[in-house]
């Protein structure tokens, strides 16, 4: 009997939310190049699909990920390259400005969330952890260091001392510590993390899409450049929003005391 391997990534649309599920359960969802490429492709498809307003990344099985399948990635690292991305795909770690998503990403984790798992969290916009989650950035124990964004973004999110505590030791920490340092925004009982994250994603998806993307763009501009640069864009970037159908609908909804029905136009 021929056995067909399951896809490394499941893709399901729930209304305006695209749910992407890591699916190498037998390998603790370790990232081989195929799964990383599938995630890149799915993010790229969500970016151009007007019906998708928010993406939710989760994992099937007991663990989010044990990290990367290092033997597959090493040849690229030795060439001074990151993993290749497929045509039309986006950078899951958000390090390539030309291939960064503009729509929001919610993420939820459980079990092991090691190395690349943390870096994907840091590239997401809202993060939920099950209380079972164990985190570790263990590269220093392997003679290498994180190149997916942890050295950049964990300092921004958690502060220097908190970031160095975990980046330099490679030790494991729990969901309570992840919440304390700002790596995640919510901790849910194990088994309830997906529904918790889905509620957040659906709430985001119900807002005005142009306004959501403008909010993300403004916040990232401040993070990646300077506060002055972001401040200079506040009013100019508001003008096209004021001219949109969604802004008019937002005003009507306010006056009529009802939720807005936004079209993204």
Image (cartoon, rainbow, N blue to C red):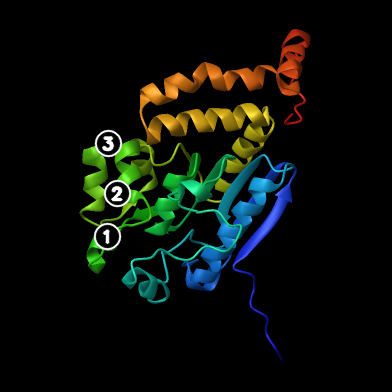
Quadrant assignment, res 87: bottom right
Residue 74 appears in the figure: yes
Which of the two residues, 28 or 255, is positioned nearer the viewer here? 255
Vertical placement of 240 versus 13: above or below?
A: above
Please give the label number shown on residue 159: 3
Whether residue 160 sits left or right of residue 15 in the image: it is left
Please give the label number shown on residue 151: 2
Q: Do the residues labelled 2 and 1 touch (CB within 8 Å)?
A: yes
Point 48% across, 70% down: residue: 32
Point 58% across, 19% down: residue: 238
Counting the numbered discs, the total is: 3
Whether residue 261 sits left or right of residue 101 in the image: it is right
Of callouts 3 and 1, which one flags the residue occurring earlier in the amino acid sequence? 1
In the rendered image, which quarter contains the N terminus? Answer: bottom right
**How far across and down, in percent of the image, does residue 66 sit?**
42, 64
Which of the two residues, 227 or 255, is positioned nearer the viewer here? 227
Disc 3 on helix, strand or loop? loop
């Amino acid at each position: 009997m021929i056995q067909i391997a399951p896809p490394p990534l499941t893709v399901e649309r729930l209304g305006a939310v695209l749910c992407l599920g890591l699916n190498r359960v037998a390998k603790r969802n370790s990232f081989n190049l195929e799964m990383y490429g599938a995630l890149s492709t799915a993010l790229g498809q969500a970016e151009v699909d007007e019906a998708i307003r928010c993406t939710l990344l989760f994992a099937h099985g007991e663990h989010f990920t044990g990290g990367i399948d290092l033997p597959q990635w090493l040849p690229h690292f030795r060439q001074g390259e990151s993993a290749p991305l497929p045509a039309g795909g986006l950078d899951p770690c958000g390090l390539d400005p030309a291939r960064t998503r503009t729509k929001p990403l919610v993420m939820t984790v459980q079990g092991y969330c090691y190395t690349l798992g943390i870096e994907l969290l840091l590239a997401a916009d809202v993060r939920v952890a099950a209380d079972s989650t164990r985190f570790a950035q263990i590269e220093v124990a392997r003679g290498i260091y994180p190149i997916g964004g942890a050295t950049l973004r964990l300092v921004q999110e958690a502060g220097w001392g908190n970031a160095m505590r975990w980046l330099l030791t490679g030790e494991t920490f729990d969901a309570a510590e992840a919440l304390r340092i700002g790596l995640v925004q919510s901790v849910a009982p194990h088994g309830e993390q997906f529904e918790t994250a889905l509620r957040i994603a659906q709430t985001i998806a119900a807002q005005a899409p142009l306004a959501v993307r403008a909010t993300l763009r403004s916040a990232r501009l401040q993070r990646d450049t300077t506060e002055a640069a972001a401040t200079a864009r506040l009013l100019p970037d508001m003008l096209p929003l004021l001219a949109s159908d969604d802004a008019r609908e937002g005003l009507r909804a306010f006056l009529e005391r009802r939720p807005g029905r936004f079209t993204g136009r």
